[in-house]
Amino acid sequence: MTYKVLIVDDSKLARMSVAKALNSLQPNWPRLEASNADEAMAMVAQERPDIVLLDFNMPGRDGLALAAELASLRPDMPVAVISANIQDEIVARARAVGATFLPKPLTAEALARFLDEAQPRLHPA
């Protein structure tokens, strides 16, 4: 089964890095990209992605605010917050809004674990 993945980061280079990791694991999954929270919300409404991978530090609303909005709209959609800011508070806040925290630089192994854990949410029993 293929899933549509939305990558949200204000850095094009960072989006390319996440896309590369995703492509190494799931080359056939369609990818969407957004550079900020507003673009991401529009994409979610129009394109209905299955999974969202988003940066924590972005201009305007940060990744945690966006993750909370996404959780209120689509509570079963797997969301990962990706950040180099690996403070316990940030990790805890990500979990509190129902998101998984993944450290930057994102590795294919960390992304694979997240995608494996997301599978049951994509295929409820």
Image (cartoon, rainbow, N blue to C red):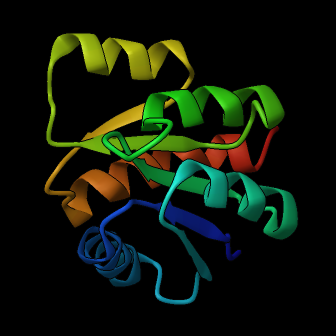
Q: Is residue 42 left or right of residue 78?
A: right
Q: Residue furthest bottom?
A: 28
Residue extending furthest toward the front: 60
Q: Is residue 110 left or right of residue 93?
A: left
**Quadrant location of residue 18?**
bottom left
**Image height of 18 relative to 42, above or below:** below
13 relative to 50, above or below: below
Image quadrant in which you'd find residue 72: top right
Give the quadrant of the N terminus.
bottom right
**In the rendering, at what x and y percent does residue 14 appear?**
26, 68
Q: Nearer the viewer, residue 90 or 11?
A: 11
Q: Quadrant of the C terminus?
A: top right
Q: Nearer the viewer, residue 2 or 94?
A: 94
Residue 45 at x, y percent in the picture: 84, 57
State the residue in front, 64 or 122. Answer: 64
- Camera-nearest residue between 53 and 39: 39
Q: Is residue 120 left or right of residue 106?
A: right
What residue sits 62% from the left and 82% below the top?
Answer: 30
Q: Position of residue 24 (x, y in %)?
A: 32, 82
Q: How many marks overall?
A: 0
Give the left or right position of residue 114, taking residue 20 as reference: right
**Could you say where residue 11 lies in the image, as x and y percent from the top left?**
30, 67
Which residue is drawn at the image coordinates 56% and 45% (left, top)?
Answer: 118
> Which residue occupies 37% across, 46% down?
58
